[in-house]
Image (spheres, rainbow, N blue to C red):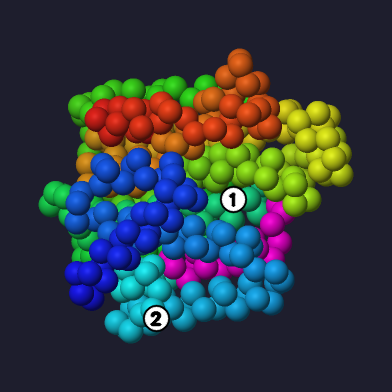
Amino acid sequence: MSNSTLKKSLSYAQTLLRRSDNDALWPLYFFPHHVRPAYLAIRALNVELSTINEQVSNAMVGRMRFQWWRDAIKAAYEGKPPNHPIAQLLSHTHQGLSPYHFTRLISAREQHFLNPSFPTLQSLADYSAGTQGVLMLLLLQALEAGGTSPSKGGGGGAVGLNHSKLFEHTGGEHPDTSSDSSFGYGSLDKGKFKGKGKEADPLTIDHAASHLAVTTTIAILLRSIPHHATKRINVIPTEIASRHDLREELLFRHGPDTPGLRESVATMVGIAEAELRTSRACFDGTEGVPERSFGAFLTATPARTYLERLSSDRVEFDVFDKRMQRRDWRLPFTVWGDARNRRY
């Protein structure tokens, strides 16, 4: 790829993120310079896939678009990308990245495109694993391939071997999912993890990332409720909605005044907070998130700050509150503080 083509592809990806996923730009500046093109390619592809439903008029055209991306990813790995900025950028940055993860991301996005509702919490967890979970694993692979520091112990290995499979949960790992949420730094409020312990191995990192991905997924879904309601789509799992007698038709008609909505949102926030605590607890007895891997965890800061605002006394779980639809001017400073203190 020529330098001019690379610059155009990077510019396209950055513009796409600024327009459709602006919060994702702030963690970018704390990634090593040589990893940033991969970060932009991964996050921009996610935006392309997640907005297909806004660009097509029917399911058949949508499925054709997803298949085009499958073919584009395959061609990018063969060094013959189609004439699309993201495909060309992926062809330039795919070294060390598992093609399986891209295929899983496309499949998960396509399934959500065809059926955007969640009957159970397990279906939400599966969606999280195939979207935000995959994104985190790709970023971890990109960081490891870029290698800001030599690997030590279990954290090393050949490029592409670590973080190549989704972490499989065995159950019984979650603390109480109370809706009395608190998104403080908890056990990770230790600056730069100067406590004693071994270095976290790849499996521990993947385990923590999989729980953090659920927190991010829930934040994204909650933020999208007002938009989806206008399209008569309910992204609150039926399992939670029925618990609080939340009725879809009333949500579509009455929005913020829907009985059971705030209670359902509070329950989801409680689950997100529990997943965050579980993610942090994965690093108990270790030195914390390895420096070379921390950027991937920093990408969850926008989700955590959104959930903090949503559960505040001023908003009280009202996802329709206009303040929750605005950009958070404090976010860049929060990301900077998290990066400086290596916490999430």
**Left or right, residue 161 beside residue 170:** left
**Left or right, residue 138 beside residue 159:** right
Q: Main secondary structure of the magenta part?
A: helix
Residue behind mark 2: 82
Report x, y in % for residue 123.
66, 54
Report x, y in % for residue 223.
60, 39
**Quick one: quadrant of the N terminus?**
bottom left
Query: Can residue 174 be seen in the rendering of this structure?
Result: no
Q: 139 and 155: which one is in front?
A: 139
**Quick one: quadrant of the C terminus?**
top left
Residue behind mark 1: 125
User: Few, some or many C-alpha atoms within 10 Å of disc 2 (few <14, some 14-19, many ≥20)?
Assistant: some
Q: What's the distance in space between the residues labelled 1 and 2, CA to CA?
A: 33 Å
- What range is drawn magenta here? 101-119
**Left or right, residue 267 beside residue 191:** right
Q: 125 and 26: which one is in front?
A: 26
Disc 1 marks a residue whose amino acid type is: Ala
Numbered circle sitting on residue 329: none
Q: 129 and 37: which one is in front?
A: 37
Is disc 2 placed on a helix, strand or loop? loop
Label 1 vs label 2, nearer the camera: 2
Q: Residue at x 30, y 27 (%)?
A: 337
